[in-house]
Image (tube, rainbow, N blue to C red):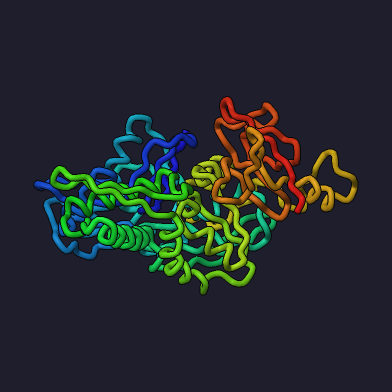
Amino acid sequence: MTYVLEVNDSELALYRDETLEYHAPAIAVVRQGQILFGDPALRLSRIHPRETNQHYFARLNADPLPHPVAGANNHADLVYLHLQELQHIVHQNPADVVLAVAGILSSDQLAVLLGIAQECGLKIGGFVDSAVVAASTYVLPASVYHIDTHLQRTCITRLRINAEVRRESAEEVVECGFANLLDSWINVIADRFVRDTRFDPLHAAETEQQLYNQVYDWVTAGDAPHAEIGIEIDYRDQVRRVELPRSLLEDKALQRFSRLRDGLPDDAHVVLSARSARLPGLKQFLDHEGHEYTVLASDAVASGCAANMAHVCPADGKLRLVSRLALSAPRPEDVQDPDAPASPRPALESARPTHALIDNVAIGIGTDNQPLPLSETEAGVYLDRSDHLLVNGTLSTAPTRLKVGDEIGNGELVYVMIRVES
């Protein structure tokens, strides 16, 4: 048994044998001498902004806090106290912990993180680049750009893929952090409230918190693909509601996503973390810029660690950051269709599905309404690893290439893969 801690401050995630045990944003709020972390802190962050800190994992240093409190004088102290919440979970079933980190962290920050984790009582068994390990079980082109959104920035990691997955570079785009995106969407919705109801939800901390909570939940819960978002504000026994199209939030986000251009060359193949793929406007930006993209499963980091545990946790016990891993998925040129003739490429293309059919309705693969965790690559369409989906009656325990006629079972629902010719 091994734990995997994915260190992303927009959603700290702790897995035990690929089972999610904990996930919460790295936000801290001080109330009455007590420090709250994660979701409870998030639900108070707009009501008590001066007592809120959401930069401590991004900075990972000993810089003093603007408002020190008992037990926390600097950012490192907050990291320590937040990790203690996770230590209580690990303590129930003691095991090694693998830290999966972004490539934008400096060596000093990595040393601080490692020292704090060990000081908390976590037995660190491995250190791995989160982009490298997440991509290690997927069929991808030879050069890809992994995008993962953090609370204060977005990380673009260039990966080279042949017999192994290797990190070549990593850079941050501060303007595209999740917190900045949330603020921009909140401002758009607040403007709509003023226009439609003559009420400004940003006028009072209580109503600003209501607005913030609903937008945050809408995006993180995966409800963003819906065409509209409805927000209700309850203030002084009066409920006000506005509805606005998703496209309005997408357009607002495009202004920030345009900052990604410098990190993405023309025709780059982009690999999106699941949290990034949920963001309104990001897929639209990539489509507009002519980039193909693959969406990873939400547990891609944990699954990649499980598939590469012998390399992630070295036998000699010496901790080193793993930034290259043997490829666990077949290379595209090695993917063979057992029914294909000797020249597989044309046969693969002709059998490539374009839609999922259910109840006589064809849903396009790669669209916002896509109902299944599907990824498109040069080699074809793949169903991501899943704990509950069946491919032709067999559990999908690894990325599975799909062909026309395949049936995917999701409970009582059955999707048939079809090809629609233009």
* Residue under the point 50% across and 42% down: 299
**Viewer-closest of 290 and 341:** 290
Residue 217: horizontal and vertical position, in percent? 35, 46
Occupied quadrant, residue 55: bottom left
Q: Can residue 119 be seen in this view?
A: no
Q: In which quarter of the image is the C terminus?
A: bottom right
* Numbered label tally: 0
**Viewer-closest of 194 and 370:** 194
In the image, residue 28 above or below residue 401 = below
Occupied quadrant, residue 382: top right
Q: Is residue 334 left or right of residue 1?
A: right
Query: Most extreme residue toward the bottom, as rendered?
Result: 262
Residue 135: horizontal and vertical position, in percent? 58, 52
Q: Can residue 329 be seen in this view?
A: yes
Q: Is residue 259 left or right of residue 211?
A: right
**Viewer-closest of 220 and 341:** 220
Residue 352: horizontal and vertical position, in percent? 75, 47
Q: In this view, does 192 lie to the left or right of 333?
A: left
Query: Most extreme residue toward the right, as rendered?
Result: 342
Residue 313: horizontal and vertical position, in percent? 50, 45
In the image, residue 39 above or below residue 140 = above
**Viewer-closest of 189 and 89:** 189
* Residue under the point 49% across and 44% down: 298
